[in-house]
Amino acid sequence: MKLAYLIPATIIVLIFTNGIASSQEANTPTQIREIEIPKPEVSVFFHLGDKIVSGWLAFLNWLGKTFDPIVGPIFRPMSKFLERTYQPWAKICALGLFVGTMLWVWFGMKKEYVNLGRNKESIWTDLRWWTIFSMLPHVIVYLYF
């Protein structure tokens, strides 16, 4: 019911605003003024960074064209197979591998085996902690994205 009133009201508003715009255009002089937008001052580092990024992109383009005939037949079937995988399951599996590895190193392996050959016993030389610290950024990235 409300939609029946909304459509004619929208048409009337559009006609009215179009009439105002056309009457304002008639009152403006025919001379068109150009607006000059000042260019920002950038440092040498910006230009250097721009050149580096352009060179890197050109290198990646060359790399892709060069190695695509070699690695394309290997990776295209895998990509086609994995396209059908539901993306949250891929994320869950990756997180499971990281967390599972952390739990396996901490609980599944003996402390003496993980820290074999350690001279000084402190928290900084315990490789179980380093396993967790090194894998935590990966887990955070997978949780975020």
Image (tube, rainbow, N blue to C red):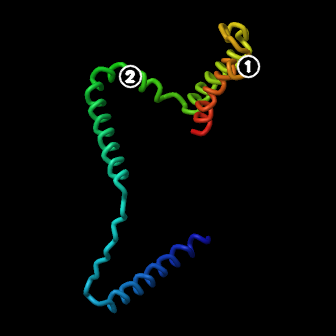
Percent coordinates x, y for residue 97 in the rendering = 61, 21
Percent coordinates x, y for residue 132 in the rendering = 66, 24
Which amino acid lies under the numbered mark 1 shown in the image of this protein? Ser
Percent coordinates x, y for residue 121 in the rendering = 73, 15
Q: Residue at x 32, y 52 (%)?
A: 47
Q: Which residue is mark 1?
A: 122
Which amino acid lies under the numbered mark 2 shown in the image of this protein? Phe
Tell me the number on the disc at residue 137.
Answer: none
Q: Residue at x 68, y 11 (%)?
A: 119
Q: Residue at x 29, y 20 (%)?
A: 70
Q: Which of marks 2 and 1 precedes in the sequence?
A: 2
Above or below residue 61? Residue 77 is above
Q: Nearer the viewer, mark 1 or mark 2?
A: 1
Mark 1, Cα crowd under 10 Å, few <14 / some 14-19 / many 20+, is few
> Which quadrant is home to the N terminus?
bottom right
Q: Quadrant of residue 79?
A: top left
Tell me the number on the disc at residue 75.
Answer: 2
